[in-house]
Image (tube, rainbow, N blue to C red):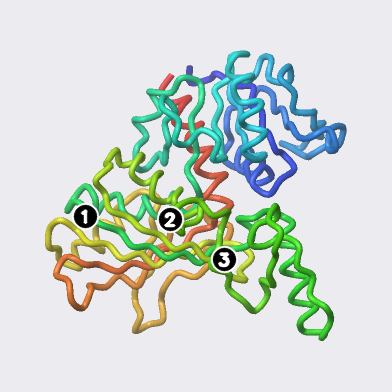
């Protein structure tokens, strides 16, 4: 199987995450026999550059998956619900980057550094977790397995790129409008489909995604539900507050963890530094800590501000930053695909 090559489809090839997937497939030298970029009818017929060649974008229809081995989906939940099972019926394994199947029974929810073994249980679809969940569970994994975790309180500072190209463009236009004293356009955030929109430039918005239950948003409940599924632990206590901030790229999280056992801070730092996929940047006295600008275009999760709680002997504080378009989406999806073909 070492020399086998694959027919790979990328659904949503013209989107922010889809474009990152294409770059990573090339940069990581994924064994591709044929690349099949798929998108809406609006983009069909356009071309992209891949491995030095022009490749024509096709419309994402059921028959477009004929002969596909691996289909990477990142075109929105409605597209995944409509086409993912069609792709599976035609023989593809789907790696889905939307919320469509994450909590479905029989669909593994995978961060390879955390629960790669779950890939083996797939029945045609493997889900990529929410971007905010991915960087958090990677930070929690070594602590969970060494000490156990009772509860997690997380507050996120999420970049506008998590809401797509339109949100990024609007932040630029809003910033220019504010600085020039012009009327500020407000059409996208916090949620494009809702009636009311707010200025993102020079502001923070304590709503990411639509309202879900008990005063929480869907994004917040994704973090709760997905983390429990990934660790296979329904007893894990977790609460989240998700906030959109005027940053282009890179999500940040302030995470408070209560462990089941007391810990030594030096051991915690060593465990985190040894965890695959994590880079520790933790020296406040030297002003060394993770920031979104530095994390952009990197696939690792960066952790700093590692410090004990002042009042709880098992409490620990972490500051966690990652590029939401890479490890939070595209990189994790490609890593799943790599693990999938390794297991054949």
- Rendered residue at 27%/41% (across/down): 233
Q: Quadrant of residue 73?
A: top right
In whole angstroms, how far apart are the C-alphas of marks 3 and 2? 20 Å
Q: Is residue 205 above or below residue 114?
A: below
Assign a secondary structure to mark 1.
strand
In whole angstroms, how far apart are the C-alphas of marks 1 and 3? 27 Å
- Rendered residue at 30%/42% (across/down): 231
- Rendered residue at 58%/25% (across/down): 70
Residue 52: give x, y in percent of width and height.
76, 37
Number of disc labels = 3
| 3 vs 2, front mark | 2
Q: Nearer the viewer, residue 93 or 244?
A: 244
Assign a secondary structure to mark 2.
loop
Q: Nearer the viewer, residue 336 or 311?
A: 311
Assign a secondary structure to mark 3.
strand
- Rendered residue at 54%/31% (across/down): 95
Residue where numbered disc 1 is placed? 150
Residue where numbered disc 3 is placed? 244
Q: Of callouts 1 and 3, which one flags the residue occurring earlier in the amino acid sequence?
A: 1
| 1 vs 2, front mark | 2
Q: Residue furthest front?
A: 214
Left or right of 12? Residue 283 is left
Residue 80: give x, y in percent of width and height.
62, 32
Q: Of callouts 1 and 2, which one flags the residue occurring earlier in the amino acid sequence?
A: 1
Left or right of 30? Residue 170 is right
Residue 204: give x, y in percent of width and height.
58, 73
Neighbor class of circle 1 (other Cα within 10 Å; few <14, some 14-19, many 20+) is some
Residue 14: give x, y in percent of width and height.
75, 43
Q: Is residue 298 above or below residue 54?
A: below
Residue where numbered disc 2 is placed? 214
Q: Is residue 65 above or below residue 332?
A: above
In whole angstroms, how far apart are the C-alphas of marks 1 and 2? 22 Å
């Amino acid at each position: 199987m070492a020399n086998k090559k694959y027919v790979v489809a990328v659904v949503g090839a013209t989107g922010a995450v889809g474009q990152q997937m294409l770059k990573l497939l090339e940069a990581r030298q994924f064994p591709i026999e044929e690349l099949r970029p798929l998108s809406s009818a609006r983009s069909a017929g356009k071309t992209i550059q891949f491995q030095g060649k022009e490749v024509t974008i096709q419309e994402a229809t059921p028959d477009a998956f004929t002969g596909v081995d691996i289909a990477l989906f990142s075109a929105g939940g409605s597209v995944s619900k409509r086409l993912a099972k069609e792709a599976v019926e035609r023989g593809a394994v789907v790696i889905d980057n939307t919320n469509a199947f994450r909590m479905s029974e029989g669909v593994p929810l995978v961060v390879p550094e955390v629960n790669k073994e779950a890939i083996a249980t797939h029945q045609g679809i493997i889900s990529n977790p929410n971007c905010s969940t991915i960087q958090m569970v990677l930070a929690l994994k070594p602590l969970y397995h060494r000490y156990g975790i009772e509860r997690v309180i997380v507050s996120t500072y999420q970049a506008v790129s998590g809401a797509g190209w339109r949100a990024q463009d609007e932040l630029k236009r809003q910033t220019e409008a504010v600085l020039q004293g012009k009327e500020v356009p407000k059409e996208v955030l916090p949620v494009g489909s809702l009636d009311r929109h707010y200025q993102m430039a020079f502001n923070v918005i304590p709503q990411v995604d639509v309202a879900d239950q008990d005063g929480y948003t869907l994004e917040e409940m994704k973090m709760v539900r997905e983390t429990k599924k990934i660790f296979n632990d329904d007893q894990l206590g977790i609460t989240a507050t998700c906030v959109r901030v005027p940053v282009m790229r890179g999500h940040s999280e302030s995470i408070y963890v209560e462990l089941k056992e007391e810990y030594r801070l030096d051991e915690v730092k060593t465990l985190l530094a040894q965890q695959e996929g994590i880079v520790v940047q933790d020296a406040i006295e030297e002003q060394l800590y993770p920031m979104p600008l530095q994390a952009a275009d990197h696939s690792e999760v960066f952790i700093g501000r590692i410090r004990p709680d002042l009042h709880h002997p098992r409490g620990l504080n972490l500051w966690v930053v990652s590029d939401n378009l890479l490890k939070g989406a595209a990189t994790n999806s490609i890593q799943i695909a790599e693990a999938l073909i390794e297991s054949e």
